[in-house]
């Protein structure tokens, strides 16, 4: 199968990360026609390695995704570079998928796995070290900064929790409330009990030396040496292209950002649309995202099978009433999948 966009598919997968590729792998192995539309901007691209993923710990993100694309293609699925600009309802309930470059196709079902965007606080220098010395997840990056001088930038709903988690990895952790009020009450007590000092005052900039994090410069001129900085970004699902079918992200109840609501199988409130990975679960690591993609694909395929079986059964009954034997020919004509399953 070539990488030229075809006119129609059983499933279009939006997003070529772990969730999207694993979903596509499951669908291709079920002999579904599937196209993955990949914008080529994975969230974890700045990271040196993927961690916490059994048998693949430390693998560079780009290598993991390259292997995933090859596996999808091995089973006849397509992976195409592009960005979906809009999705609307087409004929007979299918989805009309239009790419930003003007290409278009139709899909009976959609699997949305476009991930999220990390919106970092407006502190100069923060973005420069993102994914390396500027971190957010102790399970993704914590081992790599063990025993180092760690700073935690406050302001997010999970900032104090982050500080306590990173204290498990280092004895030297400072908490910087930055523009937020300093922790009070039990939160302050919990930090003090673990020996985490609170440094009040606004952070003016994150500074580097020889390409690595050197420390934080405070608004009053103080400089505090740090080797790693933990920050809680606001995480926002990448789904503006779904507005045409009435799907929009909602605010996460924990205040962490915006996500696309879906049930435990990935099914959204719009029939025919499933979601998997960070787009629906802001906290999912690579392994969890891949598993969610596989689960959503299995349920999506079952939904297609049920639809095709219903159509075949209706055709068989119609043929039977007309006295046409067992109705196999009419059932085949009813079709459903482009492969004639």
Image (tube, grey):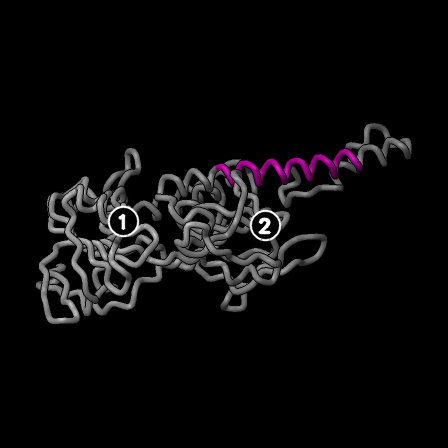
Give the SS element for disc 1.
helix
Residue that appears at 20% across and 46% down: 191
Residue 185 visible, this orientation: yes
Q: Which residue is mark 1?
A: 185
Q: Look at the image and tell me in which quarter the C terminus lies.
A: top right
Place of residue 304 in the rendered image (x, y in percent of width and height, measured from the top left) = 63, 40
Q: Is residue 85 magenta?
A: no
Q: In the drawing, does residue 321 fall left or right of residue 109?
A: right
Counting from the top left corner in percent of width and height, residue 160 is at 27, 49
Of marks 1 and 2, which one's residue comes earlier in the chain? 2
Q: What residue do we see at 55% from left, 46% from top?
A: 274
Tell me where the magenta segment starts and ends, as one range: 295-314
Name the foreground residue: 88 vs 7: 88
In-front residue for pair 148/196: 196
Q: Give me the C-alpha separation between circle 1 and circle 2.
A: 57 Å
Residue 308 painted magenta: yes
Q: Circle 2 sits on which residue? A: 9
Q: Could you tell me if residue 2 is visible in this image?
A: no
Label 2: element kind: strand
Of the pair 237 and 255, the residue shown nearer to us? 255
Q: Nearer the viewer, mark 1 or mark 2?
A: 1
What residue occupies the far front of the structure in this picture? Answer: 185
**Secondary structure predominantly adopted by residues drawn in magenta:** helix
């Amino acid at each position: 199968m070539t990488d030229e966009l075809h006119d129609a598919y059983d499933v279009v997968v939006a997003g070529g990360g772990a969730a999207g590729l694993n979903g596509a792998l499951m669908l291709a192995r079920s002999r579904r026609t599937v196209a993955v539309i990949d914008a080529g901007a994975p969230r974890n691209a700045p990271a040196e390695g993927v961690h916490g993923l059994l048998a693949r710990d430390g693998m560079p993100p780009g290598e993991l995704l390259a292997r995933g694309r090859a596996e999808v293609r091995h089973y006849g699925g397509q992976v195409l570079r592009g960005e979906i600009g809009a999705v609307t309802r087409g004929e007979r309930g299918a989805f009309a998928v239009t790419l930003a470059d003007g290409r278009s196709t139709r899909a009976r079902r959609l699997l949305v796995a476009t991930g999220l965007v990390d919106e970092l606080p407006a502190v100069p220098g923060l973005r420069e070290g993102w994914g390396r010395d500027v971190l957010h997840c102790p399970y993704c990056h914590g081992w790599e900064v063990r025993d180092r001088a760690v700073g935690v930038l406050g302001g997010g709903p999970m900032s104090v929790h982050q500080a306590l988690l990173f204290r498990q990895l280092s004895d030297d952790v400072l908490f910087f409330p930055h523009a937020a009020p300093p922790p009070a009450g039990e939160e302050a007590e919990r930090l003090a009990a673990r020996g985490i000092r609170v440094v009040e005052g606004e952070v003016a900039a994150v500074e580097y030396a020889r390409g690595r994090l050197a420390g934080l410069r405070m608004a009053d001129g103080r400089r505090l040496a740090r080797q790693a900085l933990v920050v809680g970004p606001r995480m926002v699902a990448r789904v503006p292209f779904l507005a045409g079918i009435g799907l929009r992200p909602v605010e996460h109840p924990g205040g962490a950002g915006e996500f696309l609501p879906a049930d435990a199988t990935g099914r959204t409130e719009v029939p025919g649309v499933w979601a998997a990975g960070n787009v629906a679960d802001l906290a999912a690591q690579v392994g969890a995202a891949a598993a969610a993609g596989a689960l959503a694909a299995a349920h999506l395929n079952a939904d297609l099978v049920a639809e095709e079986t219903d159509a075949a059964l209706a055709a068989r009954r119609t043929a039977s009433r007309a006295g046409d034997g067992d109705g196999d020919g009419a059932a085949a004509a009813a079709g459903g999948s482009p492969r004639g399953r």
